[in-house]
Amino acid sequence: MASPVRIVRVLLYALAITTLVLSAVCISGCVGSSGTSPGETAAGPGTAPAWRIDHAVIVVDNLTEARERFAAAGFSVVAGGEHGGNDTENALVPFEDGSYLELFAPVNPAMATEMKALVASGTFDAAMQQENAMDSRFMRHLADGPGPEDFALSSPGLNLSAAQADAGQQGIILAGPIPMSRTRPDGIDVKWHVDVPVSGDTAAVPFLIADDTPRSYRVPGGADAMQPNNVTGIKRIVIRTQDQENVTQWYDTVLPGVPASTNGSATTYMLNGSTIEVRQGAAGTQQDGIAEIVLAQGSGGELVLDNSTWE
C-alpha cells in the first residue's frame, strides 16, 4: 500500500498537470473572447503585427484591354468582380507569395472623365464631401489616370481600430474602419475593412486592410498564383515624395518596430518578404506617389512596373 505522503504527492502532481492543461486551453481559446470589431483580428499582448504588402493597385482605363495586355506579358489574370455600388470593377494578378496586383477600372469610362473634370475645375474635394475616404481616394486615382496608384498593407494580427487610435495619438489621421465589398463573378460576396490615411502626403502612404470573409475569398491562390512568366510576388514598392521627412515619420508611427535603414536620400522599410523604399523627389518633377512596383521574377530576377509602362 502506498504511503499517505506518496498519495499526497501524486494528487498534487495531477493537480499541477490539470492546471497547465486548463491554462493552455484558455490561451488558445480565450484570446479575443471579448470580441473584436468588424475587419479586426485580435492580437495578443505585446505582439507586433507581421506587416506585409497585401497588394498594389494599378489604375486602367479599360479592364478588358488591360487584362489582354497583362496576359500578353505572360501574366495569368483572374476576374475580380464589381465593387459595392457597381461603379468600379477589378481583375487580379495573384502571386505565390500571397500578394497580388489589382487592375482597377471604372465600369463606365465616363466616370474617369468626370473625375478629371472635377480636379481640373478645382471642385473635386467639394464633390467628394458625401463620400467616404476610401471612395474619395480611389476616385482621385481615376482622375490621375492609368498607372501604379496605390497599395495596401496587411498583417495577421491587424486591429484597425487600434491602429487608428495609436496613429491618432501621434497626430496621424486614419479614417476607418471603413467597410468594403465586391461580388465575384461566381456570386461570392467578399467583405473587408480598411483604414485610410487622410492627413499629410496621402499619395505616398498606403491604406491598411483586414478581411471579414476568409482572405482566400479575396486573394486567389493555388494554380491561379503560378504565373507563366515566373513572377512570384511583389518585392519592392518605391515611393517618391516632396516631403520625405513627414512621410517617413508616418511610416515610423504607423509601422512601429519595422526595421528601417537610410542610405542617402532613400529610407527603406523591411516588411515580411518585401520592402518599401521612400525617396526624396526633385522639386517640379512627377507627382508624389508610387514610382515603381518591383516584382520578383525567377531566381533573383526583377520586373519593374512604372508610369512608363502605360505610356
Image (cartoon, rainbow, N blue to C red):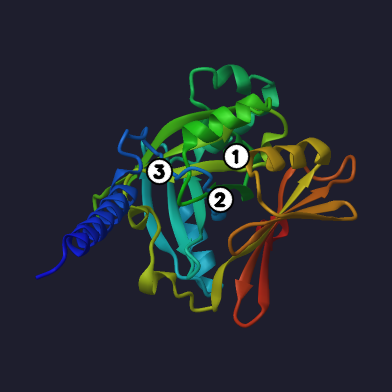
* Residue 225, position as x, y percentages in the image: 43, 70
Relative side of 152 to 257, left or right: left
- The reply to whether dot 3 and dot 1 touch (C-beta < 8 Å) is no
Specify the amino acid type for callout 1: His
* Residue 128, position as x, y percentages in the image: 55, 22
Q: Quadrant of residue 117?
A: top right
The local crowd at label 2, few if under 14, some if 14 to 19, many if 20 or more residues have their Cα within 10 Å, is many
Q: Which mark is residue 141?
A: 1
Which residue occupies the foreground of this view, 291 or 194?
194
Specify the amino acid type for callout 3: Thr
Which residue occupies the foreground of this view, 195 or 94?
195
Label 3: which secondary element: loop
The local crowd at label 1, few if under 14, some if 14 to 19, many if 20 or more residues have their Cα within 10 Å, is many
Residue where numbered disc 2 is placed: 57
* Residue 70, position as x, y percentages in the image: 53, 66
Real-space Cα separation, disc 3 to disc 1, in angstroms = 29 Å
The local crowd at label 3, few if under 14, some if 14 to 19, many if 20 or more residues have their Cα within 10 Å, is some
**First in sequence: mark 3 or mark 2?**
3
Real-space Cα separation, disc 1 to disc 2, in angstroms = 10 Å
**First in sequence: mark 1 or mark 2?**
2
The quadrant the N terminus occupies is bottom left
Q: Residue at x 56, y 55 (%)?
A: 52
